[in-house]
């Protein structure tokens, strides 16, 4: 189907599956390289978007964002600490040279602009926020047609399909999303019967494409309060995991990087372990983990049939507890989360590789030969592990798997991309995680006065586009 959606999503999934590096092939496709995606040139962030000029001695969240970006571009800025030092200058000069800019090691308007212009850059936080907050008339269909409780009921937090498609197409006509959606069966179960029976790149692509087209059960969000050290904020948790299908919704399993792409494209975020803990503690209904492997063994845990069966078991447990799938009530535990964690970077700032069994020593993805995924959850009073915040769970933050992994227990639970601070001010989750004064309210891995280094999976370029 030669529509922009197919081109965009094939490229995004290829990028996600390869950990942010261009893949040579995409399973289930005759293409040998991912199709090029044209992105409209954006205004120079240093001028129109208020980006500061950065040089040796600069400090703060803008430096941290630049360090993260330049590392994903293949240049080592040293520790991701928000301090512009010698290593960051050297990495900046190397990046500038690769882009044909004067290698002066200073991040000014031209260098900032090079990160987004001509289809070669990543979406900025402001860019995604534009999709999320721009007042628009409701589209005929949208990416993840989600309803949200106040305070943002009218603005909407989702990135509309047409807005995103037009942006990727350079402002041209968007594809007819209604036609794309109508090509799918309404039933999530029926759709999944048509995808590969095993975990493959092709299955990831097909599921992500269907979700972005709108083959998803509408969800509402519940405000969750985080209070610590005399400070307080509110974040917004999706009431259930992402349910594929307009009817017969199935809680889908995606890889960590694919889930990150989905979050990016919808203006949402993956949670930290603290956000997951608090959502569980403040949930209206809490059910026990549905462990299929206890009776089946572990062979086949990533099969599509296990995905369907696990979702059905969760729905049955939810009904027994007096709840209903798709209802406007916060429900946990519907599965494990892919989480944002400081452990996705090593102490030196390298992207982390999977951990060795029985050896907690951090190692880089280069050393490990793979990039780590981070899973967490299955809260339970008899859980054998503890979260960083002290909650009992079956799975504390784990980096045993690489980004090629998922299984029936790994659902996708998204959270709104913004929080409400005391007094009603709104800030993005990413901004809060990088704020030393507030990060501890969203992450138990840092203390007050210290910013998080990680606000998303570091191997996925923002928006899934490099």
Image: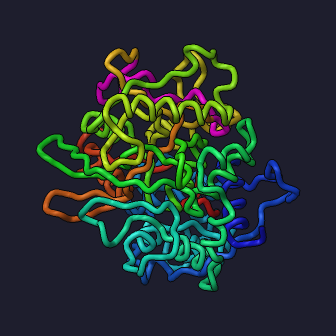
Q: How many marks?
A: 0
* Picture quadrant where residue 292 is located: top right
Whole-percent x and y of residue 81? 42, 49
Q: Residue at x 41, y 28 (%)?
A: 317
Q: Residue at x 65, y 72 (%)?
A: 179
Residue furthest bottom as drawn: 172
Residue 111's image quarter? bottom right
Can you give x and y, in whole percent of width and height, for residue 373 in the image? 57, 37
- The quadrant of the image that shows the C terminus is bottom right
Residue 106 visible at all: no
Residue pictured at 47% horizontal, 68% vertical: 159
**Closer to the camera, 330 or 229?**
330
Q: Is residue 123 left or right of residue 416?
A: right
| Percent position of residue 7, x then y | 72, 67
Determine if the magenta segment contains residue 253. no
Q: Name the residue rendered at 42%, 83% in the picture.
A: 48
Is 325 displayed left or right of 364 in the figure?
A: left
Q: In the image, residue 304 lies at what x, y percent?
A: 67, 36
Does residue 202 sit above or below 381 in this rendering? below
Q: Which residues are magenta?
A: 385-405
- Relative to the observer, which residue lies in front, 109 or 456? 456
Image check: 397 left or right of 187?
left
404 to 213, vertically: above or below: above
Q: Nearer the viewer, residue 57 or 402?
A: 402
User: Residue 110, can we see it?
Assistant: yes
| Quadrant in which the N terminus is drawn | bottom right
Q: How is the image coloured?
A: rainbow
């Amino acid at each position: 189907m030669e529509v922009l959606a197919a081109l965009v999503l094939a490229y995004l999934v290829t990028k996600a599956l390869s950990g942010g590096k261009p893949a040579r092939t995409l399973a289930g496709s005759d293409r040998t390289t991912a199709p090029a995606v044209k992105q409209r040139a954006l205004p120079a962030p240093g001028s129109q978007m208020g980006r500061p000029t950065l040089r040796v001695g600069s400090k703060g969240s803008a430096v941290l964002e630049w360090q993260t970006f330049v590392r994903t571009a293949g240049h080592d800025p040293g520790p991701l600490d928000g301090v512009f030092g010698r290593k960051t200058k050297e990495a900046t000069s190397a990046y500038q040279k690769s882009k044909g800019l004067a290698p002066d090691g200073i991040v000014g308007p031209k260098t900032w602009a090079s990160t987004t212009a001509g289809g070669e850059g990543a979406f900025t936080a402001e860019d995604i926020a534009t999709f999320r907050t721009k007042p628009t008339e409701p589209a005929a269909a949208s990416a993840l047609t989600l309803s949200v409780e106040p305070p943002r009921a009218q603005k909407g937090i989702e990135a509309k399909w047409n807005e995103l498609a037009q942006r990727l197409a350079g402002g041209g006509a968007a594809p007819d999303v209604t036609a794309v959606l109508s090509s799918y069966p309404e039933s999530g179960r029926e759709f999944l019967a048509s995808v590969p029976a095993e975990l493959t790149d092709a299955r990831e692509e097909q599921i992500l494409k269907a979700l972005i087209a709108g083959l998803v059960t509408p969800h509402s969000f519940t405000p969750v309060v985080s209070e610590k050290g005399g400070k307080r904020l509110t974040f917004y948790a999706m009431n259930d995991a992402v349910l594929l299908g307009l009817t017969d919704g199935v809680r889908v399993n995606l890889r960590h990087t694919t889930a990150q792409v989905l979050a990016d494209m919808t203006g949402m975020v993956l949670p930290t372990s603290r956000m997951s803990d608090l959502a569980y503690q403040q949930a209206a209904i809490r059910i026990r983990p549905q462990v299929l492997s206890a009776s089946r063994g572990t062979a086949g845990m990533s099969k599509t049939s296990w995905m369907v069966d696990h979702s059905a078991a969760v729905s049955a447990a939810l009904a027994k507890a007096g709840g209903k799938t798709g209802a406007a009530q916060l429900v946990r535990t519907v599965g494990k989360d892919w989480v944002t964690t400081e452990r996705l970077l090593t102490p030196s700032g390298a992207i982390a590789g999977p951990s060795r069994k029985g050896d907690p020593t951090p190692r880089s993805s280069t050393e490990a030969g793979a990039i780590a995924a981070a899973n967490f959850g299955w809260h339970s009073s008899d859980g054998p592990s503890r979260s960083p915040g002290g909650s009992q769970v079956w799975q504390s933050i784990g980096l045993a798997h690489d980004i090629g992994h998922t299984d029936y227990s790994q659902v996708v639970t998204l959270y709104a991309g913004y929080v409400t601070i005391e007094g009603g001010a709104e800030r993005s989750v990413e901004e809060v995680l990088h704020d030393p004064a507030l990060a501890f309210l969203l992450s138990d891995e840092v203390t007050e006065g210290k910013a998080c280094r990680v606000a998303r999976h570091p191997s996925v370029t923002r928006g899934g586009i490099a």
